[in-house]
Image (spheres, rainbow, N blue to C red):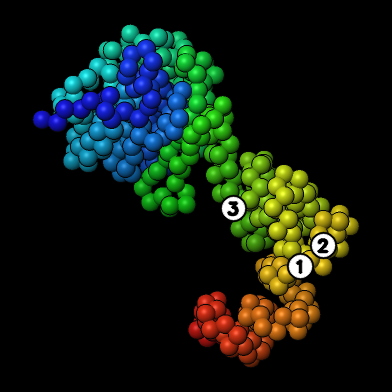
Amino acid sequence: MLMLSGIASAQNLPSLLSGRNINSTFAIVAYDKETQKWGVAVATNNIYVGNSTIYIEPGVGAAAVIAETEPEYGINALKNLKLGSSPAQAVNATMQADVMPDYRQFGIVDKNGSTFGYTGHALSYWKGCAGHREGAGYVVLGNQLADSVLVRMADGYEKTTGSFAQRLLSALSAGQAAGGQLSGKQSAALRVDGINTAWYNRIDLRADNDVNPVNSLQTLLNYHEGRIILNRSIAEIQSGKIAGGRQLLSQATVLLKGWYGIYGKLATAFIMTGEEEKAIRIIRDALQHQEGWKENLSAFYYLKEHATFRKLVNESSFSEKDWAAAIQQELNMGKNVAALALLKQKIPRYPASSGLQYLLAKAMLASGNNAAAKEALHQAIKLDPENGDAKRMLAEGI
């Protein structure tokens, strides 16, 4: 029989008082029937809480394993749920093999939203409150907590509107606001996954070592959802639904504040709605916070008629790649005449540029001049036989 030992396998540093790897933690594990997603949100007073406390398999269920953390509970729970066990049955064998089950704490939810929560008796001897509460499709649990943490977490999850991920994080935030763990806070994690969820829409967010980990997790979730809203905004704008696109863009701007890596896309969206002054403000904000953002300026060369932008950019320092970025963006924005004018200037300056020849082909194709486009593609491949973009475009049979 496998004998599990928390001292050997738990994730956290030994407690100075007990010699055990005590993990004072609070968490929520839940299933959202509407979206067919499973999620766990968890916070603790130690580093990288998401490392071994979260277990999710879409279509099977999810588990949060905390206190004297033993990963076998999460691993075996999912395996047994998949075989048809109930949430309570899914951990029976693991508990029987465990030499210290009274130090464990976990919550499990299956593919239908049935739940099981467990709090080992030994946790009642620790400072603060320890326990769990089961609700419709969710379990909240924790140890070494302020008195009302679990009640507030349940309320936060049940009464919050918004996405499933936001509801999970609202539960965690409510628990923290109610006092959280008596011994402090240092990390938090959020995972959400579901049936047919594309990899880029899965949520796996962590604040591994942070003075305000739950707040930082909220910022990361804002970025995740803000990116999705920004993409929806651009799609609306491109389809001619400018009013709807602007409304979504306004929401995205608030959620994406501080993610400077996406500010180029945000600025481009504002340009697409004709709000170039807003785009320039976005660009200036990025430059003020990240010096390296200046490398993106060439892509916004078409804003050169704006006095404010002219003060930001020095085109005399542009490299071949800078000019390629400027031309590519003009093509992206449908400014084909401006792109051709720039190409006419820059190709003589960079006669060996395969990249500029490829952009010339795109511009010619957009102008309806297929013969000139094909000629430019052949020249691009002649200059660089490994130019995959040119070879693919030629293979498409323009």
Coordinates of residue 69 in the picture (x, y in percent): 32, 27
Mark found first going from the N terminus, 2 or 3: 3
Q: Residue at x 32, y 42 (%)?
A: 57
Residue at the extreme left? 1
- Secondary structure category for the residue under label 2: loop
Q: Residue at x 48, y 37 (%)?
A: 206
Coordinates of residue 251 in the picture (x, y in percent): 65, 43
Q: Residue at x 28, y 21 (%)?
A: 104
Q: Quadrant of the C terminus?
A: bottom right
Whole-number angstrom distance, CA of label 2 to CA of label 3: 33 Å
- The crowding category of the residue bearing disc 2, from other C-alpha atoms within 10 Å (few below 14, some 14 to 19, many at least 20), is few
Query: Would you say residue 210 is visible in this rendering?
Result: yes
- Secondary structure category for the residue under label 3: helix
Mark found first going from the N terminus, 3 or 1: 3
Q: Which residue is mark 3?
A: 232
Whole-number angstrom distance, CA of label 3 to CA of label 1: 33 Å
- The crowding category of the residue bearing disc 1, from other C-alpha atoms within 10 Å (few below 14, some 14 to 19, many at least 20), is some
Q: Residue at x 33, y 44 (%)?
A: 58
In the depicted structure, whether residue 353 falls above or below residue 240:
below
The answer to whether marks 1 and 2 mark residues whose Cβ atoms lie closer than 8 Å is yes
The amino acid beneath tag 2 is Asn
The amino acid beneath tag 3 is Arg
- Depth order, front residue of 154/90: 90
Q: Quadrant of the N terminus?
A: top left
Q: Which residue is mark 2?
A: 314
In the depicted structure, whether residue 162 falls above or below residue 289:
above
In the depicted structure, whether residue 353 falls above or below residue 112:
below
User: Which quadrant holds residue 299?
Assistant: bottom right
The amino acid beneath tag 1 is Phe
**Label ID, residue 318:** 1
- From the image, state whether disc 2 or disc 3 is nearer to you: 2
